[in-house]
Image (cartoon, coloured by chain):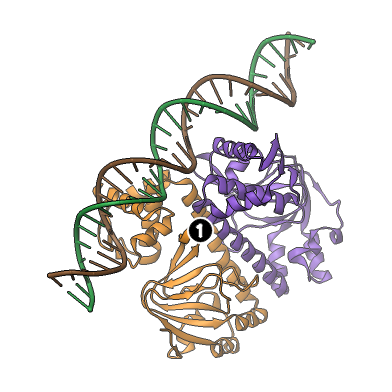
Chain colours: A orange, B purple, C brown, D green
Amino acid sequence: MAKYSRKMACTTCCLTQSIFRGLSPEQLEILNENRHEVEFNAGEIMFKQGTALTHIACILQGMVKIYIEGLNKKNLLIKVARENAIIGGPGMYVDFIHHFSVAALTDVQTCFIDVNSLEKIMKMNQNLALNILKKNNIQGIQNFKKFINLTQKHMSGRIADALLYLADEIHNATSFETPLSRQDIADLTSMSKESAIRILKEFKDARIIELSNNHFTIHDREALVKISDKG
Amino acid sequence: MAKYSRKMACTTCCLTQSIFRGLSPEQLEILNENRHEVEFNAGEIMFKQGTALTHIACILQGMVKIYIEGLNKKNLLIKVARENAIIGGPGMYVDFIHHFSVAALTDVQTCFIDVNSLEKIMKMNQNLALNILKKNNIQGIQNFKKFINLTQKHMSGRIADALLYLADEIHNATSFETPLSRQDIADLTSMSKESAIRILKEFKDARIIELSNNHFTIHDREALVKISDKG
DNA sequence: CGCGAGCTTGACGTTGTTCAACTAGAGTGG
DNA sequence: CCACTCTAGTTGAACAACGTCAAGCTCGCG
């Protein structure tokens, strides 16, 4: 289970990066006093959709999935996040409720920051608000792309997108071992698990990728890009 | 065509509302000096996806559609906006490019505000940044809902959603005349025009709605809600 | 050695798209 | 005033895409 600790020094953790760049030492100290580190085991839920949003989380180590719990127990996997990601959510400044769930894909070390402290710093330092605004907008652009992917592409196009996403944005390698299950890949591409498996097999038979269990190797990147582009 | 004018006084337009609430008179004056009013005829494009984002727009009068131009000339209608809506887009503070297109559904009066001035004010007044952040997050929550609607519901559920959306959030009436074409309704629900027409006819035959041309009347709201909920 | 969870495969039915034909109404020009 | 045309809407039939169901498989683990 999760346990409380303060192993990390503030200066080495994500507070000095990303949206927190440019905070004064005093502002960093306020955050530092209102944070705590938590470890999760693979499979455990960090944030549950519908619960109160009291903290945001920084991923210090490990991988998580961010997903919306939809109809009939079906999930839609919005994104995968790993080291240095900061997970807030659109509930901030609206209803302070989590609008997605977050689950650990691997064992994960996180740093939880109190949203009240965050709000306090935001009122002291305009840069923080602007950084968060920018981060939200980037996510918004990615969501637009996802809308088109999910609603206008056939299954092969969506699987191609997912493979390129994992290779380029998550693992930074053409050959990788993913903690995502087949069901996760199906949730990421909005299709049934069986369909996802079938398309992966097609790609394998066409020598576009190689896969055994959870190890993926992309052989023909251009083919994937072409399949992704034409839908 | 669009024409430049300054008919409105600043105090009566949208600058005093929504995200601009709480600005000082001097800050309002800066905005007022860097804005101009533009009229569009029905059908004209206000923002084109891919062009530079130099201004945000306030809708003073009329209705517009905000849509993503996707694959094979297919559009995805994100939302409909009308009086007092402020249209920016996720390109702000990222790449300053429009990531969606906006077209006038009716004749429209707008007020365009320079993004540089907006940025200047944001650095002077933290409330503006927080208000925009909040507005973005609300849109983010709506996008999550739209993800589930579009990817996990059948056509009848999506059409039911669209009808409830138009009735509740756009026209505020159970009986309304919409400027949306059948194709627009199809784009809003991510299906073919023919399918949208068929579902609307089903609803009409089931006496759930009444429609002639573009006039819609919702007779059995509960039925629509039920259809929407169960997908 | 057996159990169970996740994975795989095939057969089948449903959902939704595409294509083509047809209709209605709104200009337009003789 | 009447063809003519153009666009949006409508309908039906054929077809493709995708999900569901059921069965069998694999592999790690006790």
In this picture, residue D29 sits left or right of residue A102: left
Determine if residue A4 is in view. Answer: yes
Q: Residue at x 75, y 64 (%)?
A: B18
Residue B75: where, in percent of width, then height? 56, 44
Q: Position of residue B28 (x, y in %)?
A: 80, 66
Q: In front: C21, or B140? A: C21
Badge 1: how crowded within 10 Å, few (<14), some, or many (20+)? some
Position of A69 with respect to A109 (left or right) is right
| Residue at x 71%, y 53% (from the top left corner) | B168
The amino acid sitting under disc 1 is Leu
Q: Position of residue B109 (x, y in %)?
A: 78, 48
Quadrant position of residue B92: bottom right
> Which residue is identified by label 1?
A71
**Which chain is indicated by disc 1?**
A
B14 versus B160 height, above or below: below
Quarter of the picture holding the N terminus of chain A: bottom left
Give the SS element for disc 1: helix
Q: Quadrant of residue B32?
A: bottom right
